[in-house]
Amino acid sequence: MTREGRSMKGRRRALVCLLSVVVMTLPLVQSSASAETDGEEPSRRNALYVLHLFSNDIATFTLDPTTGRPTPVGDLVATGTMPRGFVFTPDGRRAYTANGGDDTISGYDVDERGELSPLGEPTPVDGQVPFGIAIAPNGKTLYTANLESGTVSALAIDANGKPHLIGKPVPTGAPQPRTVSASADGRFVFVSHGLPAKGRADVMVVFAVQPDGGLKRTLAPPVPVGSGGNGSDITPDGRFIYVASTGSDVVYGFRIANDGSLSSVPGSPFPTAVFPEDAAVTPDGRHLYVTSPNHDTTVTRNVTAFSIGRDGALRPVPGSPFESAGASVGITPSRDGRRLYVGNFETHDLAAFDIGKTGVLRQLAGSPFPTGGRNPTFQGVSVPPNQGPKAAFQTKVSDRTVRFDGTGSADPDGTIARYDWTFGDGAALQDGGPTPTHVYRRPGTYQATLTVTDDEGCGTTLIFTGQTPHCTGSPAARATRTIIVQ
């Protein structure tokens, strides 16, 4: 069974008692993450959150924009019992977690400083032990995989941020549904299943998303994921999904067809460190990282790193697996993909890494960092999505010379870092700054286009890898104007 999620009906109370005794034998941690940053003011843009399974709360950190170093801010915020997963609406203003101990979802308002405020009472999911949670790319629907009841729940989010069940939970047709991943186009939901016991043949099941956000099993057959299918993540282009197989010590890779059906990528499955549990694809889609809590807490090389090929095949990054700490579980890249953050279950802390160009990990100075709570949880490290930029420009025509001014472009949570221009006459200027000048060779009517990218790499494309948005890029990052040259 997973190190932080061994909850089965009839054993839940005994399990909590047993693990509480284990936790009490570990070094004591502070009950509050309260601290003040020395430089950067807390903000939603620079926030990072860590869920704790057995203190039932959330720690908030501010990430230094230059170094990536996390600094705890504020007090721990209460969740329901045994929380897992922390997902955001696309605007980053609301967040949700699944509470496996009381079968609910907790919702939060997220203010401009990144502070969390509960959205009233938790909402029941009508299923037992919601283990995994995902939000639809459009932010209108939540999905939970309910471990003990063998179902997946769909909940619509109303205008006030409260979730409401869409019909009854849908049986998945396989035992122990564990992790739920939504496709970036919003058409499909993929659910991994199983327990990490030797000899099991667990599966991933595909659901089609209905017009109201509800789910229906597709005709695509379930695909095998070894023993204990667990954390899963999807490449930003929507072509591939990867699933950690906890009892098989591998990660499976699948190509996603247009109808949602899955077929193995070349070479799948791929070996990982012992007991892989969670997975994260970087926002650029180049690398996959897999955490392993491991059975042996003295083993600290618990983050397996892969490069992702064009065909979806995985190639180990040199030096992998990388050092983290005790029982690595939750994992997320930073919004710009330059860093990786890993929650360590046994040591109650957060490891932070720089990601090299080849995917090599290097721990930040001072890592790991105490989280202030007990036992960072599965899918319990998360950052709010980067808000996409908006392009706008003006022109001034003088004969055949046109001066362009894109300084009216804006990014709601950062700055514009790149301006790419096409002038409609076959000429283009890549990364040409906000105020280029272009001379047209002949009179005519031209369509000039500006495409902008912000300082965290967000542009025209939504970046969504299965559970929560990384970047809410959209066509608004591109603007076109008609130019008439006399």
Image (cartoon, rainbow, N blue to C red):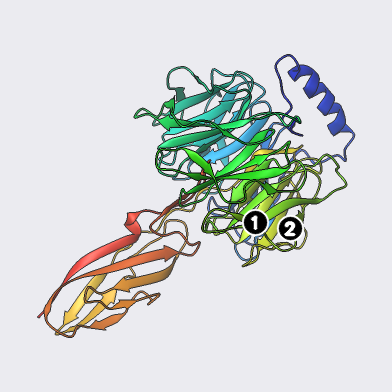
Q: Name the residue beneath numbered marker 2.
A: 320
> In this orientation, which residue lies closer to the viewer: 383 or 283?
283
Query: x%, y% of residue 239?
Result: 47, 49
Q: Residues within 10 Å of mark 2 (few under 14, many from 20)?
A: some
Note whether 136 is above or below 409 in the view shown.
Answer: above
Query: x%, y% of residue 361?
Result: 70, 61
**Residue lying furthest front in this view?**
266
Note whether 7 is above or below 341 in the view shown.
Answer: above
Residue 482 seen from this side: yes
> In this orientation, which residue lies closer to the viewer: 2 or 378?
2
Residue at x 51%, y 58% (from the top left corner): 310
Q: Residues within 10 Å of mark 1 (few under 14, many from 20)?
A: many
- Residue 175 found in image quarter: top right
> In this orientation, which residue lies closer to the viewer: 47 or 190?
190
- Residue 407 found in image quarter: bottom left
Q: Alpha carbon of mark 1 to alpha carbon of mark 2: how far?
A: 8 Å
Residue at x 18%, y 85% (from the top left corner): 441
Query: x%, y% of residue 41?
Result: 59, 57
